[in-house]
Image (cartoon, grey):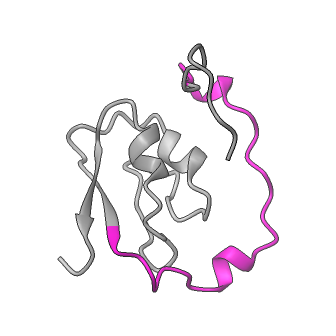
Amino acid sequence: MAKKTEDEKPIRFQSRGEMPPMPASSGTMRTNKTASWRSLRPVIIEEKCKRCMLCWKFCPEPSISPTDPPIIDYDFCKGCGICIVECPFDAIISEPEGR
């Protein structure tokens, strides 16, 4: 992993129009249920969610639907936490798996 310099800042987008296009998937992520090793699960707090869709945009699996509100498909979510970090409204929390 590359080391960050002190002047580097996280990338934040003001709107969906500023986001780069999402890469196309070959479909394997949507055919193989890959979440069996997850220990933490992200949970969207609907009252705090502003529907900015950054969670959907940055989800590497894609296990978050671009709906209103976004829905996490736990068959495919690996619990990586990227959605939690990217949410500018703190509308996604993590809970221990099995709750």
Question: Residue, x 41% and y 74% (percent of image)?
Answer: 74
Residue 30 located within the stretch drawn in magenta: yes
How many numbered dots are placed on residues in this image?
0
Locate the C terminus by quadrant. Answer: bottom left
Image vertical order of residue 76 relative to residue 92, above or below: below
In the picture, measured across the screen, residue 39 lies left or right of residue 27, that is: left
Q: Which residues are magenta?
A: 12-40
Residue 47 located within the stretch drawn in magenta: no
Image vertical order of residue 33 relative to residue 82, above or below: below
Q: Nearer the viewer, residue 17 or 86?
A: 86
Q: Where does residue 4 sit, x and y in percent of width and height?
A: 62, 29
Image vertical order of residue 82 relative to residue 17, above or below: below
Q: Where does residue 3 sit, x and y in percent of width and height?
A: 65, 35
In the picture, measured across the screen, residue 21 lies left or right of residue 16, that is: right
Q: Quadrant of residue 42?
A: bottom left
Question: Residue, x 56% and y 81% (percent of image)?
Answer: 34
Question: Residue, x 62% and y 22% (percent of image)?
Answer: 5
In the picture, measured across the screen, residue 19 lies left or right of residue 49, that is: right
Image vertical order of residue 48 relative to residue 24, above or below: above
* Residue at the limit of the structure toward the top, as seen here: 7
Q: Nearer the viewer, residue 39 or 74?
A: 39
Q: Where does residue 11 sit, x and y in percent of width and height?
A: 59, 26
Question: Residue, x 52% and y 75% (percent of image)?
Answer: 76
> Which SS type dominates the magenta stretch?
loop
